[in-house]
Amino acid sequence: AVTKADVEQYDLANGKTVYDANCASCHAAGIMGAPKTGTARKWNSRLPQGLATMIEKSVAGYEGEYRGSKTFMPAKGGNPDLTDKQVGDAVAYMVNEVL
């Protein structure tokens, strides 16, 4: 499970900046099964896999199912110019919003 100590290892202020510019377009509305930012019930099933796994999936991209609906996370949120660190900061920011 993810703890506050896990997310505090990341630059959450930078994560918010990256989120606002790249992630909010899907995560604010839950498009394509994206867990909505700030909605704990959408994140609770994902938290047990750990922050590192969530970041890996966000960097590499992910396709799957969640409660019978198709989900899709493009690699680096569809922005190949993002660094792995920027993606990690953004994921940590979103997770921090539900801890």
Image (cartoon, rainbow, N blue to C red):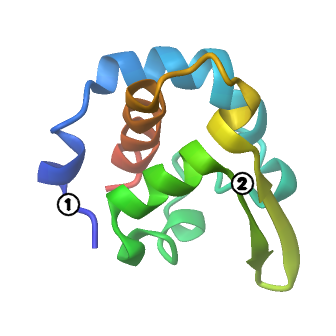
Viewer-side residue, 16 vs 76: 76
Q: Position of residue 23 (x, y in %)?
A: 65, 31
Residue located at (52% from left, 19% from top)? 18
Viewer-side residue, 45 vs 40: 45
Q: Amino acid at mark 2?
A: Ala
Residue located at (30% from left, 27% from top)? 12
Q: Amino acid at mark 1?
A: Thr
Q: Position of residue 6 (x, y in %)?
A: 19, 52
Q: Is residue 15 left or right of residue 73?
A: left
Residue located at (85% from left, 55% from top)? 32
Name the residue at the left extreme. 5
Q: Quadrant of the C terminus?
A: bottom left
Q: Position of residue 48 (x, y in %)?
A: 37, 77
Q: Which numbered circle lies on residue 34?
A: 2
The answer to whether the residues at label 1 and label 2 have Cβ atoms under 8 Å apart is no
Q: Is residue 68 left or right of residue 52?
A: right
* Disc nearer the start of the sequence (1/2): 1
Secondary structure beneath label 2: loop
Secondary structure beneath label 1: loop
Q: Is residue 19 left or right of residue 5?
A: right
Q: Which residue is mark 1?
A: 3
Q: How many marks?
A: 2
Q: Is residue 33 left or right of residue 69?
A: left
**Quick check: 32 above or below 2?**
above
Can residue 37 be seen here? The reply is: no
Q: Residues within 10 Å of mark 1 (few under 14, many from 20)?
A: few
**Quick check: 33 above or below 74?**
below
Residue located at (81% from left, 64% from top)? 71
